[in-house]
Amino acid sequence: MADAHNAFITEETIEGADEGPLAGSTVAVKDNISTEGVRTTCGSEMLAEYAPPYDATVVSRLKDAGATIVGKTNMDEFGMGTTTETSAFGATTNPADEERVPGGSSGGSAAAVAAGDADYALGSDTGGSVRCPAAFCGVVGIKPTYGLVSRYGLVAYANSLEQIGPLASTVEGAAELLDVIAGPDDHDATTHDAGAASDYAAAANGDVEGLTIGVPAELVEGVAPDATESASGDEPRAGADDEVRRVFEDALDAYRDAGAEIEEVSLPSVEYGVAAYYVIAMSEASSNLARFDGVRYGESGGFEGNWNETFAETRAENLGDEVKRRILLGTYALSAGYHDKYYKQAQEARAWVRQDFEGAFDDVDVLATPTMPVLPPELGESIDDPLQMYLMDANTVPVNLANLPAISVPAGESEDGLPVGLQLVGPQFGEETIINAAALLG
């Protein structure tokens, strides 16, 4: 297999059972999902040679379903990024345009599917890390309801936010993969039995007659938060780009023509969604990544001196700049004197976001937004501007804060031929509804 887009960190075949619903199919697995005896690097020098002693639950279910795993895909280091440029193993390029990023952090998984190197792929979504690359690469990605899919064997970044999700070239294909990986797991107490007897693939029929779709103005027109200007001097948030908005409106017209009703709704809390998300995610990351100290996990620097010096040197040498930035900010947010000012307020904002979504679903069946407010940036364009990179997640992070399901489906292309994704969000465990609606487009 020629990896023209640097989509894989490790190319290795893991055979599944002889029979099963995925027999004869190939699956690429994001490199933060444990595979027994096959290295799982999380895109980091810290775990460059780490080979887990066990399979993640989702990997066991893939093998039982007859899938052939073809490799571990490239990703932003420890899932921290929106472009797959923070990987210690080099950037992944977008099959739609090799001069542009594939999105992140599951960029390798999306690129592998888009390039035809795998039939399906698994990613993980903490704040949009399945949906963003799905949109940028022109494929389908599902972020399941929190608890629908086991996280056992997923290297933790932010436990309360992240979910493993499927990517495929069609809605039906992504739903087929979700059928295999969903369901309760004795190894993960947060899992729910909602997916135990699921048939998500059967829901992919695109029958939207009578469906009510809500469009949150704040996630299309934009909001004007009181935020520091980015390094580029641009305004922090100005809604979706014109080309993205044009494709999005055309997609809404397709839903109207098919019998769906479109209504505008308001989610005022999303103005604070990005800020709340990053405080919570970075705080959880600072705790989770403490285990990578060169003693318990990770490469040891072999430095002399006391333990604190060795710990610091090991992490300085083996962690990238973005990971260090998030650990430092998360540690600061949790520190004495600042916990109430930042982390507590972020959790209160999270509750507000969840309440807003619940109120919206009293009136509509699903919500629709552009998946990403921008077209895929050129390689190198956003990596040196962290604030702008964080703000690209404005449409996706509220879903994780509210623990809801969402799907990104290709909605069309810009005038330059770049993919644009439509995001559909449903109520908790409303996967069948969003899969049915998405199937109209993909």
Image: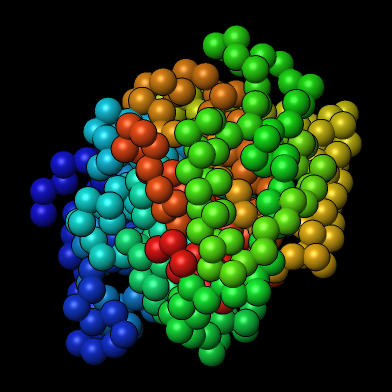
Work out which residue is located at the far front of the displayed protein and give it: 257
Residue at 31% of width from left, 65% of height from top?
120
Residue at 53% of width from left, 68% of height from top?
258
Res. 380 in view:
yes
**Whole-percent x, y for residue 325 in the image:** 57, 26
Q: Is residue 401 above or below residue 166?
A: above
Q: Is residue 209 above or below residue 240?
A: below
**Whole-percent x, y for residue 179 in the image:** 45, 79
Exactly how many numbered labels are in the figure?
Answer: 0
Work out which residue is located at the far top of the displayed protein and give it: 233
Q: Describe residue 312's horizontal placement relative to residue 278 as left or right.
A: left
Q: Describe residue 153's horizontal placement relative to residue 281 as left or right.
A: left
Locate the C terminus by quadrant: bottom left
Residue at 30% of width from left, 48% of height from top?
111
Res. 45 in view:
no
Q: Describe residue 193's horizontal placement relative to residue 355 as left or right.
A: left
Q: Describe residue 35's horizontal placement relative to residue 335 as left or right.
A: left
Taking depth in this image into account, of 23 and 440 the one nearest to the observer is: 440
Quadrant in the rendering for residue 378:
top left
* Colour scheme shown: rainbow
**Whole-percent x, y for residue 101 in the image:** 35, 34
**Whole-percent x, y for residue 312 in the image:** 53, 27
Residue at 35% of width from left, 46% of height from top?
137
Locate the N terminus by quadrant: bottom left
Taking depth in this image into account, of 129 and 216 the one nearest to the observer is: 216
Work out which residue is located at the far left of the displayed protein and give it: 1
Taking depth in this image into account, of 301 and 381 the one nearest to the observer is: 381
